[in-house]
Amino acid sequence: MGRRELSIAVVGSGFSGIALAVGLKKAGFTDLTIFERGDGPGGVWRDNTYPGAACDAPSHLYSYSFAPKPDWTRRFAEQPEILAYLRHCAERFSLLPHCRFGSEVTEAVFDGAARRWRVRTARGEEREFDLLVAACGQLGNPAVPSLPGLDSFTGTVFHSARWDHDHDLTGEKVVVVGNGASAIQFVPLIAPDVADLTVFQIEPNWISRKPDRVYPRLRQRLNRRLPLVQKASRLGIFLWFELLLNPALTAPAGRRLLSAHIRALCLFALRSVKNPALRRALTPDYEPGCKRILTSSEYYDTLNRPDVRVVTRPITEVAPDGVRTADGVHHPADTIIWATGFRSQDFVAPMRVVGSDGVELNTAWKDGARAYLGMAVAGFPNFFLMYGPNTNVGSGSIVHMLESQAAYIVQAAELLAGGAGSLEVRDDVLDAHDAAVQRRLSTTVWNQGGCDSWYLDPTRRNTNNWPGYMTGYRRRTRRLDPSDYRLLP
Ligand code: NAP
């Protein structure tokens, strides 16, 4: 059977969208449109420009296998270097002509008769595609708590993922709400400039020192001359995550063996906090790994400063000139920085995705987001997600998972181009997959470790994490089995 020309829409040009577009182009698909709400490629690495933004997975692994970068300047690259890498990839693989920047997809509706997706953008554009891929990820939409008085604040306010670089914090009273991966990176950098810094914490995190280091030029040259050196380094990091850290999170025996070790590492780092009461407040009472284990060699030292305070009482109200906590204390602020994470369970939102029976994706997911292999949803033909439900890794590199997904979706595109009119995952296949994933998650530290995290929805269903190994996911996604799908000619 001949191959038909397939029109493909990809929403998002972050790590996922780029990996997929490269795969599709290599497979010969040219009618490809990448919609991107931002002004360039890069996804979260374009949006998160807060001081100190850097990766907490080593860059030799947190990069594409098909585009190794020998000259990473440090083990954990900083945001500008990662963004430059993604821009370079978009250029090197000639993706820019396919990108429509400043084009936010607001709605995608499946037309059952034509078996095509009608895609609308905020600019009023409307186009039809044979295949739609939401490569929007889990951490694109900032979350801000809905507190009374939010609009009454007269100072400056912004979210860490939308840093206001035009605003000078020097000499200000600053309130930082949240103490997660983002906060612990920028707090040490802004603390020396501000007059007074208050960090609001609900639950503390397990934090170990960051084993970061600069890669000397010699090492960069060696990587370039002998690519095997870099490959070996990548493999070493991969195995460390797969064989050591992953079992500590997902396997009950591994958790017993390794949790004490991780706890000891973090408690060692915590010893640098001088005030015993503060040390107690910063000691988690849940199992390490339940929330993401954080790394910083500066955060705890910063909290020793006399002009930095940690407040553990919840904020109940925002006042015109600060915030008020449950005990009635008013904490003055010139600027409030929300370091409160992302709406990780929204997945494609605010985009409206309407499937074959007129059902909206969020309605289909009213009992919790679920997708076959994190990519395919029953009732939504010719539609795939990247970094969708239950594909986040608690240890390792999401880029490895995204490459697995890209290769799988390319196979779906090939099936459609080869004659299938539509491709829709079978309900029973999705149900069985979801049940197996949830069963495996039930014994992981994320579900059992005794904390709240962005992995769990309000019913404590884990909608975000993959319960196994990266290699297991690669194996499951290596070959798209057409019998998992309803194929219509
Ligand atoms: P996060 O880890 O979800 O942290 C949000 C923080 O805000 C949590 O400490 C949370 O407390 C707190 N919070 C929420 N509402 C609050 C309130 N009303 N009052 C006080 N505190 C409140 O978000 P994030 O730091 O932006 O990181 C999200 C994810 O992005 C990370 O887990 C990681 O996967 C990724 N990330 C990676 C890097 C990196 O690679 N270096 C950097 C940044 C982010 P509770 O936890 O107690 O609810």
Image (cartoon, rainbow, N blue to C red):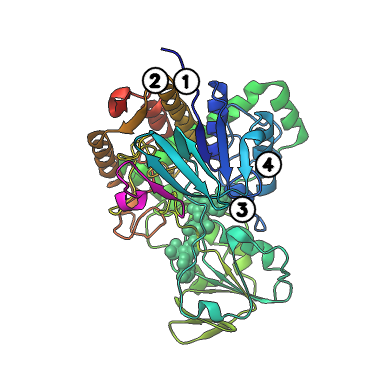
Residue picked out by circle 4: 74
x 27%, y 47%: residue: 442
The amino acid pointed to by label 1 is Arg
Secondary element at tag 3: helix
Secondary element at tag 2: loop
Q: CA distance from mark 2 to mark 4?
A: 47 Å
Closer to the N terminus: mark 2 or mark 4?
Answer: 4
Closer to the N terminus: mark 3 or mark 4?
Answer: 3
Are dots 3 and 4 in contact, CB under 8 Å?
no
Residue 85 image point, x, y percent? 67, 38
Residue 17 image point, x, y percent? 54, 38
Which label was assigned to residue 155? none
Q: Residue furthest front?
A: 113
The amino acid pointed to by label 4 is Arg
Q: Residue furthest top?
A: 1
Residue picked out by circle 3: 47
Residue 60, image quadrant: top right
Q: CA distance from mark 1 to mark 2?
A: 7 Å
Q: Nearer the viewer, mark 2 or mark 3?
A: 2
The amino acid pointed to by label 3 is Asp
Residue picked out by circle 1: 4
Are dots 2 and 4 in contact, CB under 8 Å?
no
Which label was assigned to residue 419? 2
- From which residue to which does the magenta span run? 350-365
The amino acid pointed to by label 2 is Gly
Question: Does 258 sit above or below residue 298?
Answer: above
